[in-house]
Image (cartoon, helix red, strand yellow):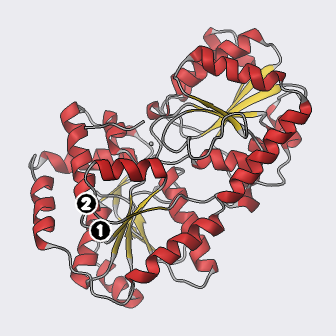
Amino acid sequence: MLTNTYLPHVGGVARSVSAFTEEYRKRGHRVMIVAPEFSQRLPDEQDVVRIHALQNFNGSDFSVALPFSGDLSDKLNDFRPDIVHSHHPFLLGMTALRIARTRQLPLVFTHHTLYERYTHYVPADSDALKRFVIELATRYANLASLVFAPSQSIASLLRERGVKTPIAEVPTGVQLQDYTGGDGARARRELGIPASAFLAGHLGRLAEEKNLEFLAAAVADFMQRHPQVHFLLVGSGPMGERLQRLFASRGLAGRLHMPGTLQGEAQRDAYTAMDAFVFASTSETQGMVLTEAMAAGTPVIALDANGSREVVRDGINGRLLMRENSGDFVAALQWLLELPAPQRAKLRREALATAEQFSMENCAGRALQLYEPLLGQPWSLDDSLYAQWQRLRNTIGAQWDILEGVTSAAGAAFSHPPYRR
């Protein structure tokens, strides 16, 4: 697996690669991960090859891999891979393409991200650049042997954009045991949240593409109507201070709780403490945090979008809102606040049942079944398609080296309704 982001970075792709790897290894398979260096390193990494990278690229918390490693070829010779699985069309994704080409191995590509939703990280952002990254990712997908789409919505979108390679829907599953049995009361005590409070919560990277200004404004409107409502905002990112100022300007700073990034038991407890998980992003390819929240028994209120519509069933395990309208969002929160205890308990049971459908065990099993037919046969890339890909990559000359780095770094947050041509 080649990925432009991996642990300890906290993001959708990093978590997806880690989760699939863990499940594959449980079943007796070997997985080598090729990923950038980060300023922090995890101890005792197993079969992880780190590539030199630019740290904190463009003031972000991403590392941007420089896809040149003298000993990668030797490590691959020792490892003897059966399949190359790429998680990006840029940087290390290009390394994946070369490995598959030279070794005549199947190339699987997971289209995690709607890259055009992340071009605001690039100084030269424009509609032309959005079209360019769409075309580049589409042509990369057509060089793969098989494309994994994290949701049905994304699979349909990729076909509309001209992907001819077979596409299979393979969401990143949730490790149910990591989110069940949490102690929500403990989380509330530690964070200073009253046991009697109605707690709306959100977990994720605090970044522009997550539509957090809309979400925060809607939650703040709801909080101003109900003094017993608190908001738990878990995560870190460039919008953190701006969101703090928004709640402070409304006189709500004392009911906003921002503990930063939480992991493990603390994260599970935080999910469990919430009465509602609120989500307004329309840039996702799948809703990983939605299934995590549901695995903790927490109903979800979300906007209808890729990823959300596959998980949230309106009125059954939460609320799915058809419009990006603050009044609608407040009304959905009001509905949940006023819901009698038996109906709220039913919502939680349905949330748990939904999470079961998206278990990591089920999703990894599907991926392994899809790998199986690719094994044991030579895969040579179509030279004409490969040449087209190379020409497109070089269209804007040396400047692409810069744009490529920023775009893929932005995509590392990944984890997205679509930009249509």
Q: Does 336 sit above or below residue 146?
A: above
Q: Residue 388: in sight, yes or no?
A: yes
Q: Position of residue 113 (x, y in %)?
A: 40, 49
Q: Position of residue 309 (x, y in %)?
A: 55, 41
Q: Disc 2 residue type?
A: Tyr
Where, quadrant-wise, is the N terminus in this rendering?
bottom left
Q: Position of residue 208 (x, y in %)?
A: 45, 30
- What is the spatial separation of the Cα atoms under label 2 and label 1, in whole angstroms? 7 Å
Q: Disc 1 residue type?
A: Ala
Q: Nearer the viewer, residue 419 or 123?
A: 419
Provide the secondary structure element on which disc 1 rests: loop
Q: Is residue 181 left or right of residue 387?
A: right
Callout 2–callout 1 Cβ contact below 8 Å: yes
- Residue of label 1: 144
In the rendering, which numbered label is found on residue 140?
2
Q: Is residue 332 left or right of residue 402?
A: right
Q: How would you rate the neighbour count of disc 2 (Cα within 10 Å): few for under 14, some for 14-19, many for 20 or more? A: many
Where, quadrant-wise, is the C terminus in this rendering?
top left
Provide the secondary structure element on which disc 2 rests: helix
